[in-house]
Image (cartoon, rainbow, N blue to C red):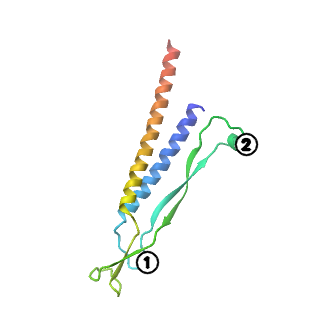
Amino acid sequence: MAFTDIYRVSGSAMTAQTVRLNTIASNLANAESPALNEESVYKARRPVFAAVYRNDELMGNKALTGARVQVMDVVESGNAVQRYEPHHPMANAEGYVYYPDVNVVEEMADMMSASRGFETNVDVLNSVKSMQQSLLRLGEA
């Protein structure tokens, strides 16, 4: 695997973790956003990732290359949660307000995981950079 392949793989992973962090931020920001009805309530978003292999790997050449990560889609999930709040300005005739089904604790755990994933790939890139600098110093001697 060439150094450029490592940069490509780690870069794609950092991009994927950035998308993941963006969706988590959106979910957390809207966790307590009320809605007038079930259809208009905010739906939690989740990115869907897939491994992307190089063409030579797909044709049977199992060279030592890594698979990049690609964001295939961002899907909406979760149902509305009804809370009985008869004095809320957005309450329906029965006194219920609709809220997103966003678990803040789960989102925070996902945020820490995405942040660590991003940091890990930064460490990989720094290691590769250090290796390349060592190779250049060997060439100077």
Q: Residue furthest right?
A: 59
The residue under the point 50% across, 57% down is 47
Residue 59's label in the rendered image is 2
The residue under the point 44% across, 36% down is 123
Q: Residue furthest left?
A: 87
Q: Earlier in the sequence, mark 2 or mark 1?
A: 1
Position of 83 with respect to 62 (left or right) is left
Could you tell me residue 65's position as x and y percent?
Answer: 62, 37
Q: Secondary structure at mark 2?
A: loop
Could you tell me residue 94's position as x and y percent?
Answer: 35, 87
Q: Residues under labels 2 and 1: Cα distance?
A: 48 Å
Q: Residue furthest bottom?
A: 93
Q: Quadrant of residue 9?
A: top right
Q: Quadrant of residue 63?
A: top right
Q: Is 23 or 101 nearer to us in this picture?
A: 101
Q: Secondary structure at mark 1?
A: loop
The residue under the point 47% across, 40% down is 121
- Residue 27, compared with residue 93, is above or below; it is above
- Categorize mark 2 by other alpha carbons within 10 Å: few (<14), some (14-19), many (20+): few
- Residue 61, compared with residue 141, is above or below; it is below
Residue type marked 2? Met
The residue under the point 47% across, 29% down is 129
Name the residue carrying label 1. Answer: 38
- Residue 37, compared with residue 1, is above or below; it is below
Could you tell me residue 24's position as x and y percent?
Answer: 41, 57
